[in-house]
Amino acid sequence: ALSDPEYIERSISYIKGWRDRFIQESPKPVFPSGANFVMIDTAPLTGDEATSFFAKGGVLVRSCRSFPGLADHYIRVCVGEEWENTRFLEVLKHV
């Protein structure tokens, strides 16, 4: 995959596009990112509570509770397949 510049460009464009949508469509603060994931402030829910909420909606996210120096009300979500990202945004609207 790394030897295919077109694949790399498509992948980067896809990730940037979804990252931007996560930021624009989130009712919660989303931290800017240069990676294939974003961090979202889920206060007043803790990261663990938000993780459980998303799991009930069929979405897996990571609680940032174990991140040194970070408060316990953040989650991290990766850009995934289109259907996964769409489902994430649907569930996010109800947090």
Image: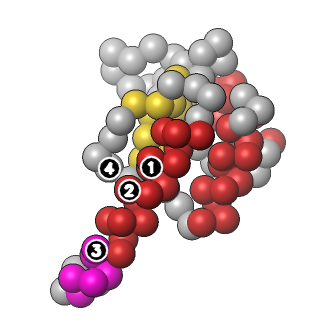
Residue annotated with mark 3 = 9
User: What is the magenta range?
Assistant: 4-9
Q: Is tag 1's residue or tag 4's residue first in the polypeptide sequence?
A: 1
Q: Is tag 2's residue or tag 3's residue first in the polypeptide sequence?
A: 3
The residue positioned 36% from the left and 71% from the top of the image is: 11
User: At which x and y percent is residue 59?
Assistant: 69, 49
Q: Quadrant of the C terminus?
A: top right
Residue 92 within the segment the image draws in magenta = no
SS type, badge 3: helix
The residue positioned 49% from the left and 39% from the top of the image is: 23
Of 85 and 26, nearer the camera is: 26
Mark linked to residue 19: 1
Number of residues whose C-alpha sits closer than 10 Å to that of mark 2, classed few (under 14), some (14–19) or many (20 or more): some
User: At which x and y percent is residue 20?
Assistant: 45, 47
Residue 7 within the segment the image draws in magenta = yes
SS type, badge 4: loop
Identified by mark 4, the residue type is Ala
